[in-house]
């Protein structure tokens, strides 16, 4: 029987069914295990990442404030020295007289020694401060060194440097420089951070001197490096003129750091933390504009992998636990599938022998807990006893439906139409004994039907589309004799490229019915195809009546909205829709027209990469 054959086929497919049951069981069990694990894990990772970010921001702010406190100490020394000279005009006068004397008098020597005592204690007690210098412009190349309690002469080239600093350009009263060369040739060469402070007359704004503080740059850098809490963390110092004074490393270019600092200076109130990348590593940037240290700014770059080290470890552990859970789910699903399919095999074998099923089925037990066993003992029993005849009726119904579908498939098809047209063609030739207008139209019509009745979404090459269009125009010329001429300008290199079938025919038909047909004089329809860069351009030009401006505006609006307001534009709108859907918005139709003169429609399509010629 057919039923036995059906169940035999089901039995043969039990291996694929087992796989499907396994996948379903795996998905169910995996979801039960993974959903709580996923929620808890993602929440933990998100919370840890957020707390790590907040902690890193607090640490970065604390580091920059501590760095600012260190530099503030240096500037406090400079300010105190400035106040000392500003509030003691007698000291200024004594030093200036000493600078002006060719040979220092005994009084000038004593004055210099007394003034030196005010600075020596500071130099000896501050670990960072290397030396202090006071300079007044003089004719003897001298500079005051409190550490040695003398006015020391220095070479002319060093005097030139001092004069450059003395006449420091701009409105800055205080500025900083880093240098590896000592200010005096008698000093040991060591990297130094030098802070310059202009001195002014007490009653005027005229500069009359310069005080210079030299700090140990290595100790300062070591102190700032000691503030950093992450490996590869980097801090940079930028002055008020947006110049990079001191980089802790050379990983980033000065231009990139200054650009980042300028950006953060204008957007420092925003909550988003900028991220910069270098050598496949990402850094979070923290910016501080010092409110005290004469407009200096600090930029701190912290490696993101160090900030989120705990988060990354937690994520790795979470992934490992998730994979382990999936493995457990696979094992569980495998054994569950084997257990369940044992009962399904019994159901299939029972269906395969419905005539003996009642004899094989045992009475149901009161302690049945397995749903498949319940199906086996009850549902199959009901099916065999009550629904067996219904299955046979269903089989007859299915056969009837199959017969109806086969009858539909044998309805008239396009081959019948082509054969009929060919028969008419030969009959017309027999009547006249040769080709005639009727036979020509039938021949063209048969070719057009064969071309148009196939899949409209099929791709053809441009040459096939042009050949089809020529046959269509030949029929239209026979219908509208002496009404128009058709001219083709097809670039040879465009004929091989693919295009959607029947894109040009609706546009040419529109030119005939709405342009040429309405004009008394003989018109011209020109179809051109050319390539420009990576696109092919199609143009249909006619010398018909043209389109009034209001109607042209309505057509363009319909094309933009991909709809139509009347039945007159259906060909244009449909063609435009096919172009946009097939090639994108850039391939839509474009129309230009002058009433009583001409109309031109053009569009372009991209050249597929697989058909592009070498060198394109």
Image: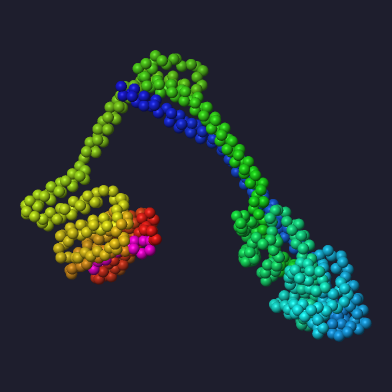
* Quarter of the figure with residue 34: top right
Depicted 86 relative to depicted 398: above or below = below
Residue at image coords 81%, 85%: 139
Q: Position of residue 112 (x, y in %)?
A: 89, 78
Residue 504 seen in this snapshot:
yes
127 on left or right of 525 = right
569 on left or right of 368 = left
* Quarter of the figure with residue 205: bottom right
Q: Position of residue 437 (x, y in %)?
A: 12, 57
Depicted 329 relative to depicted 75: above or below = above
- Magenta stretch contains residue 133: no
Residue at image coords 31%, 67%: 592
Q: In which quadrant of the rendered image does the N terminus lie?
A: top left
Depicted 41 relative to depicted 72: above or below = above
* Quarter of the figure with residue 118: bottom right
Residue at image coords 18%, 54%: 444
Count all numbered tags in the image, as a single digit.
0
* Along the viewing direction, whichever of 584 and 549 lies nearer the viewer: 584
Range of the magenta residues? 531-546
Residue at image coords 42%, 22%: 347
Scheme of colours in the image: rainbow
Q: Position of residue 311 (x, y in %)?
A: 64, 46
Q: Main secondary structure of the magenta part?
A: strand
- Magenta stretch contains residue 532: yes
Residue 554 seen in this snapshot:
no
Q: Position of residue 330 (x, y in %)?
A: 53, 32
25 on left or right of 609 = right
């Amino acid at each position: 029987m057919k039923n036995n054959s059906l169940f035999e086929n089901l039995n043969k497919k039990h291996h694929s069914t087992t796989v499907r049951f396994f996948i379903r069981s795996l998905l169910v069990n995996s979801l039960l295990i993974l959903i709580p694990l996923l929620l808890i894990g993602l929440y933990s990772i998100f919370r840890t990442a957020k707390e790590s970010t907040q902690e890193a921001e607090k640490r970065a702010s604390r580091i920059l404030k501590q760095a600012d406190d260190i530099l503030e100490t240096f500037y406090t020394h400079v300010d105190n020295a400035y106040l000392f000279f500003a509030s003691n005009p007698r000291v200024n006068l004594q030093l200036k007289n000493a600078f002006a004397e060719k040979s220092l008098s005994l009084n000038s020597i004593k004055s210099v020694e007394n003034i030196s005592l005010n600075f020596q204690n500071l130099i000896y007690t501050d670990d960072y401060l290397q030396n202090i210098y006071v300079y007044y412009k003089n004719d003897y190349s001298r500079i005051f060194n409190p550490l040695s309690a003398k006015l020391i002469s220095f070479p002319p080239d060093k005097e030139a440097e001092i004069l450059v600093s003395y006449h420091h350009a701009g409105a800055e009263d205080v500025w900083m420089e880093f240098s590896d060369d000592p200010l005096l040739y008698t000093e040991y060469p060591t990297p130094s951070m030098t802070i310059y402070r202009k001195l002014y007359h007490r009653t005027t704004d005229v500069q009359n001197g310069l005080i210079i503080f030299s700090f140990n740059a290595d100790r300062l850098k070591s102190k700032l490096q000691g503030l950093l809490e992450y490996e590869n963390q980097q801090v940079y110092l930028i002055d008020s003129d947006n110049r990079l004074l001191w980089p802790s490393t050379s990983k980033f270019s000065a231009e990139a750091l200054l650009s980042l600092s300028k950006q953060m200076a204008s957007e420092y109130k925003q909550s988003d933390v900028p991220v910069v990348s270098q050598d496949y590593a990402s850094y979070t940037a923290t910016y501080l504009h010092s409110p005290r240290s004469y407009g200096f700014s600090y930029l701190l770059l912290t490696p993101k992998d160090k900030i989120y080290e705990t988060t990354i470890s937690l994520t790795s552990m979470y992934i490992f636990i998730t994979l382990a859970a999936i493995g457990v789910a696979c094992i569980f699903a495998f054994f569950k599938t084997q257990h369940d399919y044992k009962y399904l095999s019994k159901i299939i074998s029972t269906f395969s022998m419905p005539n003996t099923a009642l004899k094989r089925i045992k009475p149901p037990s009161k302690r049945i807990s397995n749903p498949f066993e319940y199906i086996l003992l009850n549902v199959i029993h009901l099916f065999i006893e009550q629904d067996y005849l219904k299955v046979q009726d269903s089989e007859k119904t299915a056969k009837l439906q199959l017969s109806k579908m086969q009858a539909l498939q044998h309805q008239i098809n396009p081959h019948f139409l082509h054969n009929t047209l060919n028969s008419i063609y030969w009959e017309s030739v027999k009547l006249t004994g040769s080709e005639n207008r009727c036979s020509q139209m039938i021949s063209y019509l048969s070719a057009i039907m064969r071309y148009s009745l196939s899949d409209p979404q099929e791709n053809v090459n441009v040459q096939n589309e042009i050949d089809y269009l020529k046959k269509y125009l030949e029929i239209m010329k026979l219908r509208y004799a002496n009404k128009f001429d058709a001219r083709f300008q097809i670039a040879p290199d465009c004929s091989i490229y693919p295009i959607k079938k029947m894109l040009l025919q609706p546009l040419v038909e529109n030119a005939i019915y709405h342009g040429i047909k309405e004009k008394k004089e003989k018109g011209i329809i020109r179809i051109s195809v050319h390539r420009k860069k990576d696109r092919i351009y199609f143009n249909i030009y006619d010398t018909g009546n043209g389109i009034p401006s209001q109607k042209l505006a309505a057509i363009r609006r319909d094309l933009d909205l991909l709809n139509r307001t009347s039945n007159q534009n259906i060909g244009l709108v449909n063609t435009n829709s096919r172009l946009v859907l097939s090639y994108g918005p850039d391939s839509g139709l474009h129309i230009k027209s002058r009433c009583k003169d001409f109309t031109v429609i053009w569009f372009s399509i991209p050249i597929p990469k697989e058909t592009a010629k070498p060198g394109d």
